[in-house]
Image (tube, rainbow, N blue to C red):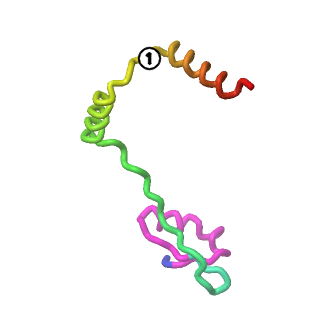
């Protein structure tokens, strides 16, 4: 399947999904003219061990203060009151 018409979208959707999972692109035809291309969207890969180590090293370089949930809640509420109190 290299192309599909707009009317065939309903009847050949299973075949279209199958082609997209393989990684193929499909041209969309409307009134005998190519109006677009349907291509698979690739999911981002999960973080690798190298990426996790890099993130940890960046976090230690930033040296951010450790906050408890109560402190986070208090700071967030203070921010909201300051932002929306008029």
- The residue tagged with tag 1: helix, strand or loop? loop
Residue depicted at x 41% and y 65%: 22
Residue depicted at x 60% and y 78%: 35
Residue that extends furthest to the front in the rendered view of this protein: 86
Residue that extends furthest to the right in the rendered view of this protein: 86
- Within the image, what quadrant is residue 5 found in? bottom right
Give the x, y percent position of residue 74: 56, 15
* Residue to which mark 1 is pinned: 67
Give the x, y percent position of residue 47: 34, 42
Instruction: Tell me: 20 left or right of 55.
Output: right
Instruction: Tell me: 35 left or right of 17.
Output: right
Instruction: Tell me: 76 left or right of 31.
Output: left
Q: Is residue 21 magenta?
A: yes
Give the x, y percent position of residue 4: 57, 76
Quarter of the C terminus within the rendering = top right
Residue depicted at x 53% and y 78%: 3
Segment tinted magenta in the rendering: 3-27
Label tally? 1
Give neighbour class at mark 1: few <14, some 14-19, many 20+ (Cα, 10 Å): few
Give the x, y percent position of residue 53: 26, 35
Residue depicted at x 43% and y 57%: 42
């Amino acid at each position: 399947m290299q192309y599909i018409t707009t009317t065939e979208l309903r009847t050949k959707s299973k075949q279209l999904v199958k082609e997209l999972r393989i990684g193929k692109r499909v041209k969309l035809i409307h009134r005998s003219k190519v109006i677009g291309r349907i291509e698979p969207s690739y999911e981002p890969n999960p973080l690798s061990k190298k990426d996790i180590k890099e993130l940890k090293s960046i976090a230690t370089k930033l040296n951010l203060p450790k906050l408890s949930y109560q402190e986070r809640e208090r700071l967030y509420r203070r921010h909201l009151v300051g932002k929306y109190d008029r």
